[in-house]
Amino acid sequence: MFPTLKNIFEKNALLISLLLAFILRTTAAIFNFGPAAYDDSQNILDPALQLLFGKHDIEVPAERFFSLPYLFYLFMKPISLLGVDRADYLVSSGYFFIGLLSLFQILGIYKLAGLYLNRKWQNLITLSSSVYALSPFYATRVELDGLAMIPMTWALYFISKKEPLLSSRVWGGFFLALSVYLKFSIAPVFFVLAGYLFIKDEKKFQGLMGISAGGAIVLFLMVTEEIIVGRSPLSTVFSYLDYNYTHHVGSQSYGTMPWYTYLAILAVYFIPPFSFPLLYAFIKGIKNSLLPALVLTIFVILYSIVPFKLDRYILPIIPAFFLITFRGLQELESNKLVQRSFYLFLIFSSLISILAATNGSQLANIKGTIELGQLKKQHRILYKIDPFWHSFYGIQNKYPERLSEIEDLKNSLQQKRSQEVYVLSFLSIPENELKLLSSNKIQCIEKNRFYPSYAEALIIKLNPQFNNRRRETVLYLCNP
């Protein structure tokens, strides 16, 4: 039985990997419809839903492009035409199409691995990429770091190809520039790689012209988009620089996150304790993976200089990190500890990917907001709730009051005497605040409570500082 399964996998590794990735990502789109972060909620999901609900003058920050909200709007449009108007269903359908798009990254890693690895390890890196622990989540979000993995994988493939030189460099430059379009902070990688290839290529000017031409195509498309939406050429780039390196510097927790943060993340990326033997494989693989190693090094150095650091920021260079590690695994074929660690990682990672696909992100806020939005005739108040979920509430509805102080809540409820008012609160309203309301003849009764998913509950426990916003919300009915 086992040899048969092994033979089936060896002959159909790409197809099996794509099928597994499709199943996991579709599951994540259905059951895990929360955004990855505030950024994608505020800058992509919210404008896309506004477009879908008929608002055409959407607001997109000056340092972001309009294309992604419009793309996600188009992904949600088919199910909208069927009469679906609940935001969670619409977002899930959009995530489904993002998941389909992400399958090109699996195909890209398979093609890229074919240039560096033998058939066995080419198959295994493809399988590992499709079932990696958090891939069902990040591969279905409109989160720029995760999206940038797709063109970055193909950029590495075409830049690693030696023949045909010119067309490979054009495609390499195009996909690398597309990664920059999604994440401007990747731009230095483009220029360093162009210089590296100029030194390394035998036909230096042909290769340099090719990568430059590919980059110029994306630059032309970017400027064209800016002109269409009424912006000055390259103004988005300058706004990004101004926001991140001038006005935003003060809020980036400068100096609180050590410079080696990303090195530490990469060291445990293959899930401890398996990650430690696999780190040895990574070191072993550097020698014969110089171009991916160069990309990884540039990226880590640049991102380590930036004050504020998050784990998702390194997603664009994970394909390079995987490739180097699997090259080391290939060379350490006889090392039993390393090999066993890899297979245990693969099993454990696959199990975590199922949890990632079936456990929602920030669902306590979203489910509470959805239920509040369905109470169309009553007065509604958001109390201590983040202002990033109003699209899930429903753009067609009049947006509820948003209050954060108990005195404001008391005054607002007193103005609505003899009326039912629903209040969605972040966490339970504290006992002393309920007593204050009661002393003013305002009674609030808990009607429903929305909890984070099991995985989120674990994340909150492990890292409460950055995940407190994921905790439960409570819906009250107040009768002033």
Image (cartoon, rainbow, N blue to C red):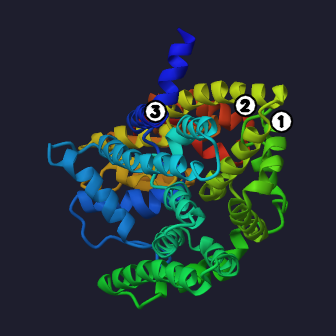
SS assignment at label 2: helix
Residue beneath the point at 76% across and 29% down:
339
Tell me if label 1 and label 2 are in contact, CB under 8 Å.
Answer: yes
Mark closest to the chain's N terminus, 1 or 2 = 1
Q: Nearer the viewer, mark 3 or mark 1?
A: 1
In the picture, the disc for residue 76 is: none
The disc labelled 3 sits on which kind of residue?
Leu
Measuring from the top left, give residue 347's x and y in whole percent: 64, 24
CA gap, disc 1 and disc 2: 8 Å
CA gap, disc 2 and disc 3: 21 Å
Q: Is residue 52 above or below residue 106?
A: below
Tell me if label 3 and label 1 are in contact, CB under 8 Å.
Answer: no
List the single residue furthest toward the bottom. Answer: 232
Horizontal side of 282 relative to 135 (left or right) equals right
Neighbour class for label 1 at 10 Å: few (<14), some, many (≥20)?
A: some
Mark closest to the chain's N terminus, 2 or 3 = 3
Residue beneath the point at 62% across and 79% down:
194
Q: Quadrant of the C terminus?
A: top left
Measuring from the top left, give residue 416's x and y in whole percent: 35, 49
In the picture, the disc for residue 277 is: 1
Q: Quadrant of residue 27?
A: top left
Tell me if label 2 and label 3 are in contact, CB under 8 Å.
Answer: no
For mark 3, what is the residue?
24
For mark 2, what is the residue?
342
Quick one: 326 or 204, which is closer to the camera?
Answer: 204
Measuring from the top left, give residue 358's x and y in whole percent: 48, 29
